[in-house]
Amino acid sequence: MNHKQALKHPIFKIISQSAEALNIDSYVIGGFVRDYLLQRGNAKDIDIVAVGSGISLAKQVAKNLPSQPAVQVFKTYGTAMLRYNDIEIEFVGARKESYSEHSRNPIVENGTLKDDQNRRDFTINALALSLKKENYGELLDPFNGLNDLDKGIIQTPLNPDITYSDDPLRMMRAIRFATQLNFKIEENSLKAIAKNKDRIKIITKERIVVELNKILESETPSIGFLLLEKTGLLQYILPELVALKGIDEVEGQRHKDNFYHTLEVVDNISKTTDNLWLRWAALLHDIGKAPTKKFHKKIGWTFHAHEFVGAKMVYRLFKRLKMPLNDKMKFVQKMVMMSSRPIVLASDVTDSAVRRLVFDAGDHVDDLMTLCEADITTKNPRKFKKYHNNFKKVRDKIVEVEERDHVRNFQPPISGEEIMAAFNLKPSREIGIIKEAIKEAILEGDIPNEHNAAYDLMLKEGKKLGLKEMI
Ligand code: CTP
């Protein structure tokens, strides 16, 4: 079957003509072909293999494009890249790679298209479409990748032991593709991953996190985390999650398996939000439970202060994985820290407790509620309904309190300057005391969040502190 349809973008004709001018053969390969065949939408990255110099082909293509884009050359890898509108095109010369056991750097030789397909990670990524004039659009599929696409199988073109050991990142990629595409990893491949898992250590944390994020961004992230756990990779990447696995029993009392619970929460939240960081929060919301787990004769299993401990662990985990220690990390920490607050509230929804929740969570209060709703994993339909109804009440109350009291991103109705002017004060601790008393009174609902009421309270509090009002 011919796939000219895949190559209808004008760029392919230009690449084809440029290759012809240089008298070399060229092919589209990898993700573009895979995603076209899967009808996954138009990929923004195109990989081109030239049987000859990929760098020369890139330069020729750039010359033939009206925009004459710059060509970025990576000499060490023998690759070149250029941008055409919003498309990124990467060129590589077809090559043969051989690895020795002791070095990550392969010995690279020029090769045929088949050699190049051999060195690729998966059969579904080794599919190539010809850009040659005589068989333009023909699919070259030496490993029956089409069949694997059809059956939903991830397998390597070569012996999987070689493919994964050559480039251990491929272990993460296999699991990531299995998650994104809902494919199965072929049995020998899975065994080879488990066998080579320790080699993941030579891969940079940044590249591991790229794959982790893609797993988390998938429709059902648990597929990936279960595979990471099964192959032993999770122990290296996120041991905090592995530590949540298992159920202890003392005196007939058991707690739930917090690993599987966590994965359910992540899958739940992925149905309601695409926010990667909220998904991270779901993944990490219980990590404090492993180090805080205790059994008490009278009350059973407890995880005292696990939210606090968990939030601290988030920082160390982000740091270890070289993830950004910025507002995203702080957001995840905040979600973990506050993850039990709405649950406590749900049974007794008072105005003041909701005001405090909104005050503390600020703009993230909706995300927090989304996390708590995803946290409901009970299999008892009656309880499931009850918990959701309770949270619905909390959500309604949040809206009501918000409309009335405006405590989200709270701005004190009386400024420090006003307090200083009222009592003729220099900056001093009394100002802080008065401001805190006003804030507390508003959150408690003793006074409305308004200037006049706050001013009266300020006068009262000042008096208590022995301050004299300026007349
Ligand atoms: N590839 C490989 N081994 C790797 C990375 C990539 O063999 N560790 C090959 C595969 O043939 C892959 C192609 O290089 O299809 C392009 O890689 P990349 O752009 O990273 O991935 P895609 O397959 O295009 O998929 P995605 O865009 O979803 O990452």
Image (cartoon, rainbow, N blue to C red):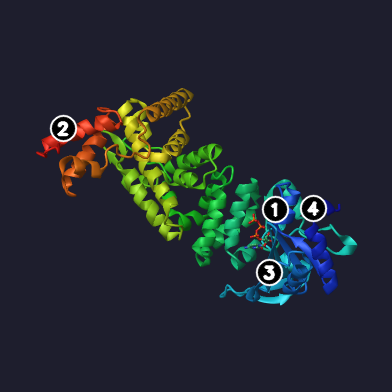
Instruction: Identify the residue at horizontal 79%, vertical 67% (top origin).
Output: 64
Q: Is residue 402 left or right of residue 264?
A: left
> Residue tagged by mark 3?
70
**Which corner quadrant of the image does residue 167 belong to?**
bottom right
User: Could you say where residue 301 lies in the image, as x and y percent from the top left?
Assistant: 32, 38
Secondary element under disc 2, as helix, strand or loop, is: helix
Three-letter amino acid code of the residue under disc 1: Ala
Front residue (pair 190, 216): 216
Q: Is residue 125 left or right of residue 331?
A: right
> Residue tagged by mark 2?
460
Front residue (pair 202, 269): 269
If you read the primary sequence from the N terminus, does the residue marked by circle 1 or circle 2 appear first? 1
Front residue (pair 245, 292): 292
Three-letter amino acid code of the residue under disc 2: Lys
Q: Which mark is residue 43?
A: 1
Three-letter amino acid code of the residue under disc 4: Ala
> Residue tagged by mark 4?
6
If you read the primary sequence from the N terminus, does the residue marked by circle 2 or circle 4 appear first? 4
Point out the quarter of the image occupied by ligand 1: bottom right
Find out if the beta carbon at label 1 lies less than 8 Å from the nearest ligand 1 atom: yes
User: Could you say where residue 71 lies in the image, as x and y percent from the top left?
Assistant: 68, 70
User: Could you say where residue 293 lies in the image, as x and y percent from the top left?
Assistant: 32, 44
Q: Nearer the observer, disc 1 or disc 2?
A: 2
Q: Nearer the observer, disc 3 or disc 2?
A: 2
Front residue (pair 199, 331): 331
Q: Is residue 257 left or right of residue 153?
A: left
